[in-house]
Image: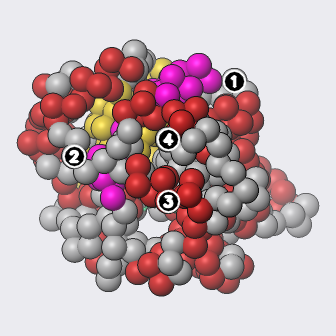
Amino acid sequence: NEIYLNGLGDVLPGLPTDLTRLERLARKRLSPGAHGYVAGSAGTGATARANREAFDRWRIVPRMLRDVTVRDLSVEVLGASLPAPVLLGPVGVLSIVHPDGELAVARAASALNVPMVLSSAASYTIEEVAEAGGEGPRWFQLYWPKDPEIAASFLGRAKAAGYTALVVTLDTPMLGWRPHDLDQAYLPFLRGIGVANYFSDPAFLKGIGGSVGADRSTALLHWAAIFGNPAVTWDDLGFLREHWDGPIVLKGIQHTDDARRAVDAGIDGVIVSNHGGRQVDGAVGALDMLPEVVAAVGERTTVLFDSGIRSGADVVKALALGARAVLVGRPYAYGLGLAGEAGVRHVLRCLMAELDLTMALSGITRPADLTPEFLRGP
Ligand code: FNR
């Protein structure tokens, strides 16, 4: 409505309302380094393509004459009510695309009451982002580091700063083979853009003699040494519970056996995700695994989804296949790069408005009413 009304006064939205066009605009306007960091994926890009192809294989079958005047997009996720089944997924190193980075994302998310999942690898600290987000809902994402003291310290800081849920990313015990970043020799990291949480952490600093110092190279090498922990196994999940008393969600689940193990271990939710195709090249499209995971654990836990969401219709498809809510990654990073906080708000509002319209036009008034019956697929 706002867009139509503004249009009457000859005011256009400014940014594309089709998020795939927004992506193309970002390619033109962002620096090649910043664009490449966000757009990049593992290897030949086969997994990122598979993510989109998986969405294309499912089609919505709209239903008619069902009184869709009153609609309610809200959903309950892990005990909290969200205005829509959409969250901002964890995206690290965001000041590479805009100087305000995660602070701008937190403000945009908070204005719409949409949860932001803050990355461990953020360019602003856990505390700075919490302050920027004010009363808005926030979750914290952990890259499980080698040093358990740092992990415990991160969780303590996140708890103290009002992050309510913990997302533990399992698919990144080390960074994938990302040609774009490799070709740039991981310059953003070497410049220390995504290390704010580490360089401000007492447990991390202890490992480098108490301070980062003027020459940051020792600190950066230490960061690279502790960033991921390839040794963790299912037996280590107890550590998370010991240090986090709120809901815990495992991100990067794709196989039903892993989903079952997570639920058996008392985990509160899983995110079916392949990291937007940035970890394993040649992997299955994330949406292709969603129905199986939902069939395996959907009745026992909260199943969330990400990897490839680009439109409200995509959200409809993921929900119809059993996701309680979805996370978006690249689209809001592009919005941030193009227009800062306003760009992130634009992306979220487009996604939510298109979701609302697609549901209404398909004969649906509440996310909970979306079932596989509304889709035709492979
Ligand atoms: C990510 N992702 C990610 N995930 C995570 O758990 N911690 C992180 O720090 C990051 N960082 C990150 C940076 C960039 C630039 C991208 C594009 C992605 C993965 C992210 O949370 C999510 O899984 C994907 O982005 C979802 O796919 P789409 O929406 O980008 O297709």
**Mark 4 surroundings: few (<14), some (14-19) or many (≥20) residues within 10 A:** some
Q: Is residue 33 above or below residue 353?
A: below
Q: Pinpoint residue 87: horizontal percent, then vertical percent.
A: 51, 41
Tags 2 and 1 in contact by the CB under 8 Å rule? no
Residue that carries the numbered disc 4 in the rendered image: 207
- Front residue of 318 and 25: 25
Q: In which quarter of the image is the C terminus?
A: bottom left
The mark closer to the camera, 2 or 4, is 4
Q: Separation of disc 4 and disc 1 at Cα?
A: 34 Å
* Residue at image location 59% in from the left, 62% down from the top: 217
Q: Separation of disc 2 and disc 4 at Cα?
A: 20 Å
**Mark 1 surroundings: few (<14), some (14-19) or many (≥20) residues within 10 A:** few
Residue 238 visible here:
yes
The mark closer to the camera, 4 or 1, is 4
Please provide the residue range marked out in magenta.
153-174
Instruction: Determine the secondary structure under disc 1.
Output: loop
- Amino acid type indicated by mark 1: Glu
Q: Pinpoint residue 316: horizontal percent, then vertical percent.
A: 39, 49
Residue that carries the numbered disc 2 in the rendered image: 231
Quadrant housing residue 55: bottom left
- Front residue of 341 and 212: 212
- Amino acid type indicated by mark 2: Ala
Q: In this view, does 362 lie above or below 183?
A: above
Q: Pinpoint residue 344: horizontal percent, then vertical percent.
A: 67, 53
- Amino acid type indicated by mark 3: Leu
Who comes first in sequence, dot 3 or dot 2?
Answer: 3
Residue that carries the numbered disc 3 in the rendered image: 221
Q: Which mark is residue 135?
A: 1
Q: Which mark is residue 93?
A: none
